[in-house]
Each structure stands twice: as structure tokens, then as C-alpha cells.
Amino acid sequence: MKAKKVLFITSEMVPFVPESPRSLRGRFMPQAIQELGHEIRTFSPKWGIINERRNQLHEVIRLSGMNLIIDDTDHPLIIKVASILSARMQIYFIDNDEFFLHKGLLADENGNEYPENGERAIFYARGVLETMKKLRWVPDVIHCHGWATALAPLYIKKAYQDEPSFCDAKVVFSVSEKEFEADLGKHLLDIIPFKGIKTKDYSDICTDKCTFEDLSKIAIKFSDGVIVDNKEVPECLIEYAKSTNKPILEPIDEEAIPQAYSDFYDSLME
């Protein structure tokens, strides 16, 4: 059986945010997979740096209007969309006036990482999944790429496992080089639980702190397959992925990546 439908949950992509290896991958990988014959959907956070007028974003009223409760507080979920006409791609953006007003993705202009980054990751992951339920588009594979997506595998496998949109989907996480330095804190670990999720689901990884490595390990634990994004990935994450006995795709030459990813998706469907 082949993976016909692939959902990309990415943390950043050009031309909406500045160019970087991660934002380039977020932009061109969905296009390459689509050109290989897969049907795709792509999500990104609506970071404050994104110029809505220039990029022609507009709100999708039928998908917006829900409130997500995080740490006993209601946070309105706003869905926006834009198109990349040259690639025949439509991008869905998860927005919220509290979480995505900052001009930086992870940190301010002085390099100070935002204290609510953990909550932003929760909101983004749950926002994507709630939106997918409304779209009623059922993916075969869900590919998560970037720190902001790291909690999505946990939510898919533990909180949304009975949802028709996700119950049969295979989850892939691209583990990357270290993206942030701060400890996201025990408070984040206390507010992750939702529906069937308990703190014991990740207490084997972390109990009183949540570093980049801890967050990545949670993603790896609840994924069906792991892609090692590049040779800068911390060795401890590669070792942890191997210890889970999950299928792993090691770094490969750039030009070979699209077909290798497509084959990797298909292998998970067997």
C-alpha cells in the first residue's frame, strides 16, 4: 500500500519567513512530494513576522471560531490561508493574537527566547488537529518538521487516536539540529495533558524540565518513523531514536531526498 495523502505540519517556510535551511525544507519538500504524485496539505504557524497583505493571507471563517483551553485559559483559534501559485500549493496558517504577535519565531531581537514558547507549541499542534477534523481530509502520513510541531505526534497518538482523520495515519518526525536553548519548564509538562494524555506518558523522558532534546524525544516516542534531518542532529537524539526500534531514515544527499521520503512514507504503510 502506498501513502497517497501526506499532511505536512511544519514550523516555518519561505517566502513567509526569512530563508533558512529549515524554512526552505518546509517550503520545497511539500511541493516535491506533490510532484511525485501525492496529495498534500500543509500547515504553518502564522508568526508575527508574516506580512498578511504582501502574502495575501485571508481568514477562513468556516474553520475559525473555536477556543482551545490551555492551562485553564481560552485561546481563540484563527485559521488563515494563502497560496503559492507557482507550486499549486495552499498553506493553512494557525493564528492567535496572543501567541503569534511576536516578530520573532523563537526569540526577540536580543536573542531572548519567549517564555510562552511551550504553550505556543501546544496551541499550534492542537490547532492543526482540530482544523483537520473540520476539513475532513484523511491523511495516510503526517510529517512533522520543526520544534513547534514536536507535540503533534503525542496528541495524534494519545488524544486523537480514535478520530477518523488520524486513527490510521502514520506519523513521521524530522529530528533536527538544536533549535532553542531554554528549558521550557515543568509548567509545560503539567499543561500538556489533554483528553487521554497523562504526564506518565512522557515521565520516562522528563519530569521537571523540558529541553529541546526532551521535546524531541517526546516526538520520537510517539512517531511511527523518524527522519534524521541533517548531520547536525545531537547524537543523543539519534541514539534515543535507535533505542525505540522505529524505522529511521538517515541523512542523504539533497537531490535524493524527495524520492527517499516518498519511499519512507510508503514503507510505513506496509
Image (cartoon, rainbow, N blue to C red):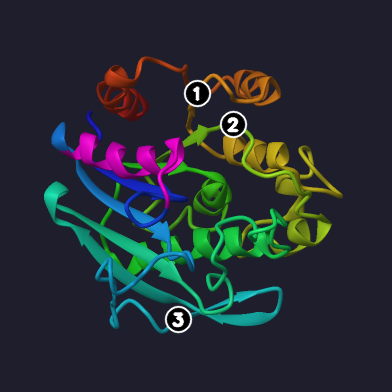
Residue plotted at (69% across, 53% down): 111
| Amino acid type at image mark 1 | Asn
Q: Which residue is mark 3?
A: 66
Which residue is rendered at x = 28% and y = 59% of the image?
91
**In the rendered structure, are the residues bearing label 1 and label 2 in contact, judged by CB atoms less than 8 Å apart?**
yes
Q: Amino acid at mark 3?
A: Met
- Residues at marks 3 and 1, CA–CA distance in whole angstroms: 37 Å
| Residue position marked by numbered label 1 in the rendering | 230
Q: CA distance from mark 2 to mark 3?
A: 34 Å
Can you say which quadrant of the picture contains the C terminus? top left
Q: Mark 2 = which residue?
A: 177
Q: Residues within 10 Å of mark 3 (few under 14, many from 20)?
A: some
Give x and y (percent) for residue 238.
62, 21
Q: What distance separates the C-alpha of mark 1 from that of mark 2?
A: 7 Å
Instruction: Please give left or right for residue 134 compared with residue 151 in the image.
Output: left
What amino acid does circle 2 point to? Answer: Glu
Q: Residue furthest front?
A: 110
